[in-house]
Image (cartoon, rainbow, N blue to C red):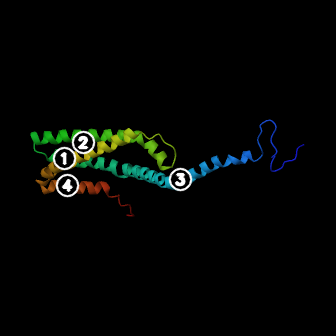
Amino acid sequence: MMQATEAHPVCHPATGTTPLDGFAGSHVGILQQLRALDQLPALMEPAARARQIATDSLALFREAILEHHLDEERELFVAALASARPGAEKDRVHAMVERLTREHRLMEGIWRFLEKDLKRVAKGQDADLDVDEVHALVAAYASHAAFEEAEFLPLCQTILGRNGNHMAALGLSLHLRHTPPVVGHI
């Protein structure tokens, strides 16, 4: 067998490579992966933010938006319809109530479609969150809120404000809906 010297390194007869040739290129892949690892801390913040937004959105819809819709439909809409003057005013209120109720169902339907994937995002799991549906929900709610704030609520203020008892009755009704029952010993 031939001895290796500086001038003549030992070569593999079939490939013509030396034992050091395997080491020379091995660092390329290692360095590439380590550079990717170096990016990980910067990526963790947006991932954590995505989980938090999903968690907060789930709570918002469950604890606030659905309750808000119920308050409007069971209390505000009923009070406005009951207090509106017969004729054009009552017809206008009725049309607005129908529109707002339809929009509630539409937004709730989009929400049900998104909810499963949002739960996965909240847990840090992979999800196929439908971006178009997210945008549709946000746009629908923005439009709904703008109409309600600019058109419906001012009309309700006018209608319910004509009689202090009507406004007080709405306030009491909402209060009772959100006050937990007192449980005690008799």
For numbered disc 4, what is the local secondary structure?
helix
Image x and y of residue 168, in percent? 18, 57
> Marks 4 and 3, how far apart in space?
59 Å
User: 10 Å neighbourhood of mark 2: few (<14), some, or many (≥20)?
Assistant: many
> Marks 2 and 4, how far apart in space?
22 Å
Which quadrant holds the N terminus?
A: top right
Residue that appears at 66% across and 49% down: 27
For numbered disc 1, what is the local secondary structure?
helix
Relative depth, front residue between 29 and 165: 29
Residue labelled with disc 4: 169
Q: Which mark is residue 152?
A: 1
Q: Amino acid at mark 4?
A: Ala
Q: Which mark is residue 100?
A: 2
For numbered disc 3, what is the local secondary structure?
helix
Label 4 vs label 3, nearer the camera: 3
Q: Are marks 2 and 4 in contact (CB under 8 Å)?
A: no
Pick whichever of labels 3 and 2 is earlier in the sequence.
Answer: 3
Q: Are marks 1 and 2 in contact (CB under 8 Å)?
A: yes
Relative depth, front residue between 180 and 59: 59
